[in-house]
Amino acid sequence: MIVLKNERDLEAMRPACAVANAVLEEVAAFIKPGVTTREVDNYAAQRIKSYGAKSAFLGYRKYPCYVCISVNEQVVHGLASDRRLEFGDIVSLDVGVVYNGFIGDNAKTVAVGGCGVAAQRLMDVTERALQEGIAKAISGNRVVDISRAIQNYVESNNFSVVREFVGHGVGRSMHEEPQVPNFVEGKSSPKLRPGMTLAIEPMVNVGRPEVQILKDGWTVVTKDGSLSAHFEHTVLITESDPEILTCREKVLSRLKGL
Ligand code: MF3
Ligand code: CO
């Protein structure tokens, strides 16, 4: 069942998404050579709390951290540790918060200080792939139109999309229907309708698409060790253009006390 959000729901969900985006940008600005990923997670915890929000990830299926911090060949769900970030690393940050009873979910990959041209191209292509997908998030289209746009853009740039993890509906729960794959599957695909809220999140590898999970039970890495990037927005399907909910500029200024 796909949960459509009405205007009252959206009045609560817009601020949740704005907070998620504000925290993501603050955590991204905290990234620099020499900091440990545990320090990053602690900083994220502090920023989330400062808005009166809660992490949507901590405790979810026993997930042990506030945010996901995935370095280089780590794709998603990287755990905080004593690892120090080094100049030239790329770090995928995934931030989901609960606020007003709704979840905002977003992610981006950033370089630590700077990075090589291949890593920069990977990040650019992944971010652009997300925008290509969002551009298809239009009432009357199907979910597969989003998937196809992302896959085509990524593959025409000679990178690959991860199959095992997908985007999703999001609202009062973190994972609602429908699934939003970053590739075209043979299955029937739901029609997009106003009021649907989707987390669109391409995960893109420089090399092969296959991934595996480390012994910690969480960290997803590329099987071939190639670099991976991840960008995510929570998006509302409307009667007209898609509304990117995790864009804090649009909403945060309207929020009292933030
Ligand atoms: N953005 C990710 C997702 O939508 C974050 C989940 S991390 C988890 O699946 F730890 F909470 F699982
Ligand atoms: Co997500």
Image (cartoon, rainbow, N blue to C red):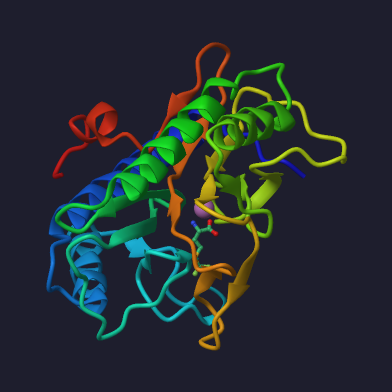
The quarter holding residue 190 reads top right
Picture coordinates of residue 50, whole percent (x, y): 17, 60
Q: Quadrant of residue 122?
A: top left
Residue 220, horizontal then vertical, whole percent: 53, 70
Q: Does 125 sit left or right of 19 as displayed?
A: right
Q: Is residue 169 visible?
A: no
Q: Quadrant of the C terminus?
A: top left
* Rendering coords of residue 240 (x, y %): 54, 11
From the viewer's perspective, is residue 181 above or below residue 59? above
Observer-nearest residue: 117 or 239? 117
Q: Is residue 229 left or right of residue 150?
A: left
Q: Is residue 57 left or right of residue 223?
A: left
Rendered view: 161 above or below 7: below
Looking at the picture, tell me which residue is in the foreground, 106 or 121.
121
* Residue at position x 43%, y 31% in the image: 128
Question: Residue at horizontal 27%, vertical 63%?
Answer: 89
Asked where in the image residue 164 lies, by quadrant, the reply is: bottom right
In front: 220, or 152?
A: 152
Q: Position of residue 255 (x, y in %)?
A: 21, 36
Is the residue 166 above or below the residue 184 in the image?
Answer: below
Residue furthest to the top in view is 240
Q: Which residue is found at the position 42% from the left and 81% from the top?
A: 64
- Residue 66 shows in the view: yes
Which part of the image, by quadrant, shows the N terminus? top right
Q: Which residue shows up at 33% across the image and 78% down it?
A: 80
